[in-house]
Amino acid sequence: MSTVCVDDLVPDLLDDLRAVDAVVGLSDAELLAECRSEELGRRVAEGRLIERMIELDRRRLYVADGYTCLAAWGRGAHRWEPLEARSRRNLVKLVIACPQVLERLLAGGLGVAQAHLLGRLFKAPRIGRFVPLFIDDFLAFAAEHDYVGFEQHCRAWKLLMDQDGSKPADWDRRARLGFTDHEFLLSMSGPAADGAKWQALLARFERIEWELDWEHARAVHGDDACSALLARTSEQRRYDALQNLRSHVTLPPRGQRDEPVDAADADVFADGDGGGGGGGGGEADAVSEPARARPAEGRPDGAVTTVVDIVVDLQTFLHGLDRVFGIPGNLAQRPPFGPDRARCQTLDGVSIHPRDAALAALYGTVRLVVTDEFGRPVQMTSASRLFTGNLRQAALMGATTCTHPGCLVLTTHCQVDHLVPHSHGGPTQVDNGGPGCRHHNNWRYTARAQTRLRDDGVWTTHRADGSRIAPAD
């Protein structure tokens, strides 16, 4: 058994300590610049890895070790996560077809995760072969948007390019319920339009569970209450919310369907806060059993309603109607890129098939907002300072998440904030409002930062000195 002398480790330890001291001694600007430099280096390193994998694949060097492809080699030889391995394998194939992707990576102008997403999109059934035709547009979009926005755009493009899918939407729905010795597993899959309704309904019940946990935490810990002290995890609250939802199931009269919900009857988050603070005074054992939802005013006890908003441009909606009635489409398809690109999605960015949006509008099960050619909802104004009701919903439809770069808080959990502050004469109307989470709304106010919506539909955030946060690559 070999031994390691402590003296041999001293030089390495001293080097590590010096490196730590060097980082601690950096100014704020230098530290930010160092982090940016490291990120650019990571992109360059990824590009060089892809460059070498192309040659490795050409020589098929992985075959000698029993690997069947680059993805298997990466998983085995380098312990890559399966999705990462497939993405790199596909990215190699994309780079061979589109060398500009590798050039952008080596120049530091394309994020690693965005490049992997393009690789997976390139291998998507039926539509992957069209990616090279739009690759310059994809790269331009990636430079301006964070990963979440870019992913949503890729999903929307995929839906536009593959509207028929591999099979009719009616076939692609299934639910499974299985049991083990002491547990069960419930899984469902189906059209995204149905999933959006489930998401809205579940969010309503999760909010009830969160409020109970918060009341309990305030009762026990007082002003020291915080999310880390809540009695249940988010997954436990979601499970209890499903159980609560199950207890509210009622059977409609035989031969009748549930009546459509009027848009004015309910609002998923009336105050725009996806997890706001509740008050104190809750019972200590308030979370010992699933909560019982409060009955909606004017409805039978226990009835809980939700509204799903689908934002769609007029041309895409008309295409959806044509598909519902089997009419050959005579309108030109809207392009998948640019400010006039086609749009059909929920507030949170879930892509909806135009046919499903048209059907939902005909049945009256959702609130549909048709946008103009610039992707903006019909103008609505209010004399009130606060964005409320339909005005609030319309303002939220400008984005699928908080407009601060990189923020993942979904639009349905956001507040609406004035782009030009009300104190500076900013009007309370749709084109002067946008979704922002509670934290970033407060931050913008204290930091005197400003959010802007460009004519091409890109949200940008600027510091008080006018410089842009997370500028385009």
Image: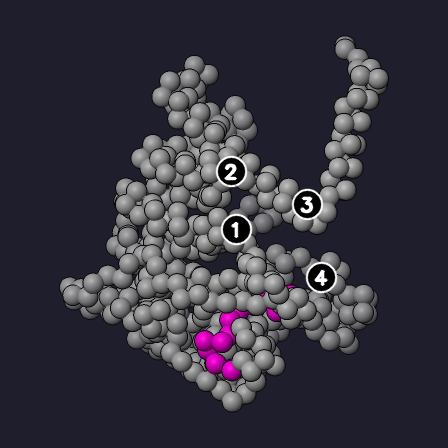
Say what secondary structure mark 3 lies in.
helix
Which one is in front, 311 or 466?
466
**Placement of 45 over or under 407, stated as above or below:** above
Q: Closer to us: mark 4 or mark 2?
A: 2
Label 4, residues with CA under 10 Å away: few <14, some 14-19, many ≥20: some
Task: Name which residue lies at 39% across and 75% down.
Answer: 377
User: Which image quarter is the N terminus in?
Assistant: top right
Pointers 3 and 2 in contact (C-beta within 8 Å): no
> Viewed as shown, does residue 462 lie left or right of 194?
right
Residue topped by disc 3: 31
Q: Splitting the image into 4 quarters, where does residue 263 fall?
A: bottom left
**Placement of 31 over or under 265, stated as above or below:** above
Task: Name which residue lies at 43% across and 40% down.
Answer: 104
Residue furthest toward the right? 7
Q: Earlier in the sequence, mark 4 or mark 1?
A: 1
Give residue 47's position: percent from left, percent from top: 46, 33
Give residue 304's position: percent from left, percent from top: 52, 76
Q: Is residue 176 visible?
A: no
Q: CA distance from mark 4 to mark 3?
A: 30 Å
Say what secondary structure mark 1 lies in.
strand
Give residue 12's position: percent from left, percent from top: 76, 23
Q: Splitting the image into 4 quarters, where does residue 284 fall?
A: bottom right
Q: Closer to us: mark 4 or mark 1?
A: 4
Pointers 3 and 1 in contact (C-beta within 8 Å): no
Q: Which mark is residue 227?
A: 4
Label 2, residues with CA under 10 Å away: few <14, some 14-19, many ≥20: many
Residue topped by disc 2: 43
Task: Give the extent of the magenta segment.
Answer: 427-442
Pointers 4 and 2 in contact (C-beta within 8 Å): no
Task: Name which residue lies at 79% across and 22% down.
Answer: 11
Pointers 2 and 1 in contact (C-beta within 8 Å): no
